[in-house]
Structures are given as C-alpha cells and as structure tokens.
Image: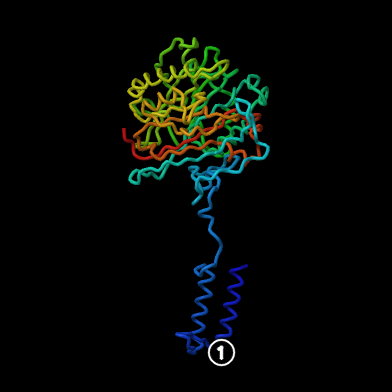
Amino acid sequence: MERRSRLVDLESASLKTRSAGCVAWRRGAAKPLPAAVGFVIVAGLVLASYLGFLPGSGSASPAGRGGAPAGGGGGAGTVDGTGAGAGAGTGAGAGAGTQKPVAGGEASRLDGAAVKPAKSAVVPVPMPTSEKATETLRIGTWNIEWLGKPMDRSGLGQGIAQTAVDIADYIGFANVDVLALQEISPQGAAGRANSPTSPELDAVFAELKSRTKATWRYVLVPGRNEGDQLCGIAWNTAKVNAVDGAGKLFAAGQERATKLAVKGGRSGQGSGLWNRPPHAMKFSAGAGKTDFVLCVLHMKADYQGDFAAHRGEEAVALVAALPRMKQEMKDEDIVLLGDTNMTASGSNPEVTEKTLVAAGFVDVNAKAEQTHWRGGATDRIFVPVGQREFAGHTLEIMSDRWLEAKRWTAKDFKRRLSDHYMVVTTIAVGGDDD
C-alpha cells in the first residue's frame, strides 16, 4: 500500500506539472522549468519509486533476520521426503538463532530434571577460500531404537512398532545421502550369511523410492552374540557408490563392510569389549571425486552401571586398529560415527572423546548438543583433522526443526520413532586427493 500511495501521489504531481510547469529551487530562488522537462523528472521519480530505488520504498528484505530456522536455505526437503534440495544450510543472513521450543515438549533428563527438546543445531565451520567446493554430501547417524523388536523398546515406545512412513518421512526430511544405523534387529529376515537384511528397512527404502525415485541400498553387520542390535550403513545410490579398498565398485547385492581388527576380551570392568564390533565401508562420490570411509560405532551403554572406563578401553582398541584399516581401504578420509553412549562431554569429556581427538579426529559435536530425547549427547561424529573435505563440516541435530514441522512433542518422537535423534554433518565433494 505504501508503494501504491507514493505512485498515486507522484502521478498526481505529474498531472499538475503538465498544466502549470515545474519549479526548481536553487539557493532559495525559484526558477520555472518547461512543462516537458518537469514531466520527465516526475516520470523518473515514479519509475524509481516503483522499482524500489527511493529511500523507504519497497518491502523489507528477509536477509539479516537473526534466528531463522536452520536449513532455510538448504532445500532440506519436505516432511514427505519429496524435496530435492542438496543441503541444509542456513537461511540468508540467518545467523545461528535457535528455534522456538515446541509446546508441551518437555521431557525428563536421565537424572530426572526437566529439559526442553534438543535444538536442531547447525554449526558451520568456515572452509578455506581456496578449498571451497560447490557440492556437499550429507552424512548422518541414527540409532532407531530396537527397529524390528518393538517389545524391547523402552518407556513410551514399548510395544509400538515404528512405521515405514514415519521413518521415511524423517530420513527424507533430513536429506541425508549416507546414514549409519544402530539397533537394527533383523527378526525373521531371510538374509545372506554374514549379511542379514531387515524387512523394516526394506519397507522404508521402498517408501522412499516411491516418493523420490531414488534407490537406497544398505548393509547390516553382525552384532551381539544374541543376534540383535545390529549396526549398518545405508546410502542413496544416486549420490554415492560403495567401493572396495581399491576403489572398485561392488556389484549390486555384493556390497560388504570390513570388520576392524579391534582387541577383544574383557575390560577392566569385566564386560566384553566391542560386543557390537565396529565395521567400515568405503564410498565414492564418482569417478575422480571425493571418496571416504565410514566406520559405524555402537559403544557400551551405561546400563546397570557407569561404563565410561570400559568405553575408554574400547576407544583405545579402536585407535589401535585404525592404521590397518586405513591400509586396507587405501584412504585417510576416515569418519567415525554412531552411538558412542558417552555421557560426559564439553568441559569434562570422557576418556573416549579425549582418545579419539588425540588420534587426529575432530568431534563435530564437541559442544555436546543434546541428541537423546531425555538429555545427553550420546550420538557423535568424528571427522579427520587436516582433510580438506571436512574443513567446512557442519552439525545438525534433527530435533527441533522436525518437531516443529510435524507439530510433534519430544514424547511423540520417542513413541513413534526412537529415543535418539539423527545427527548429520557434511562432506565437501571435490577431486580425490588420496
């Protein structure tokens, strides 16, 4: 209305000019101008106002609004997973503002204190100017609480089977290209020996394909002796390919993960080390492009005790196994990710975190942003120091942004999906450097 009013006023002035001429003021003295000249000047002002060049004209730009929701500029996809955006960057000028908490979304912390749902934190780390890439991959990790064995789920989720639609919604919303998985129970699956399958995951990826036409593949790896809580890795074949250590593509259906040669036996606390052994897979973004290795972790939880020291021993065993794994994979771009079950972080990190950082990794969630619905930063991603693909990594915890989009509370998330939120980082795609 403001622009329209100014346009009307200036058009009225133009009509007066055509009949009475225009007066130019200089040093306090008026000097009449020919009507035609005056009309040209006024017409120019009308055009300038219409185009927004005059002070106060036009509408305010959204750029520079602090606290815009994370992912506003990154095309992170719709709730139904149909979005085709490539990343989840922040909106123009958005800053790192937090999102409004969801009403009714309070939950109990592990120690019983009330907390808000975790923030969908997006923490960008600037990439050196000379190293900037135009394409990124989104790499995530998610513990899908007892997928396939709903009766083993806890609390609000006990006995409730997660649906393929809900899981596909969440994965599509997160817009991940590769996803490390934990707590998959392939109950009743007719999979190959040493490479089990999950009917629940099959349904999820069929649902995603029906929406996006993208084909997802996954590999599950042996877990505990009980045969449950398997880890695995899933990937969008339109974005990356699984390759062997030499960089050769696996034939479809023949993809496999490599078990790390970690020390077994029992820890000083008497529990078995790495009952869910770490496995790794190598991926390529295309011929001559970035390749990298993902090593999925699921470390011992503090179930019936404090097992921080036990996890510390597992971390030492993991670091000792990395040189051989790098040699087998012929790659230094190693990402460690998964449910570490670490409870102490930030200014008082666990031995596990200290050990991995000392081994040359960066904890993407070093600030210990909440990843568990009741509090705690158990889910982590560690990227290598000094590798240009990871210099501009970001962190996003898929909590608030998802809850707001779905109008869910944290309790709804726990009931329908998991007690863990997905954690996502980015890898820059460029020419292969190793």
Label 1 element class: helix
Q: Residue visible at 43% across and 27% down?
A: 336
Residue 272 shows up from this direction: yes
In the rendered view, tell whether residue 430 sits above or below residue 325. below
Q: Which amino acid does label 1 sit on?
A: Ala
The image position of residue 48, as x and y in percent, is 50, 72
Quarter of the image with the C terminus is top left
> Where is residue 94 drawn, in percent x and y?
51, 49
Q: In this view, does 412 lie to the left or right of 99?
A: right
- Which one is in front, 214 or 87? 87
Q: In which quarter of the image is residue 3?
A: bottom right
Q: Residues within 10 Å of mark 1 (few under 14, many from 20)?
A: few
Q: Which percent across, then down, holds residue 19?
A: 57, 89
Question: Looking at the picture, does residue 186 appear above or below residue 379?
Answer: above
Task: Answer yes or no: is residue 249 visible.
Answer: no
The foreground one among 258 and 11 is 11
Which image quarter is the N terminus in? bottom right
Provide residue 137's location: percent of width, then percent of height.
44, 38
**Residue 360 occupies quadrant:** top left
Q: Residue at x 57, y 42 (%)?
A: 82
Identify residue for label 1.
20
In this rendered view, identify the residue nearer to me: 224 or 301.
301
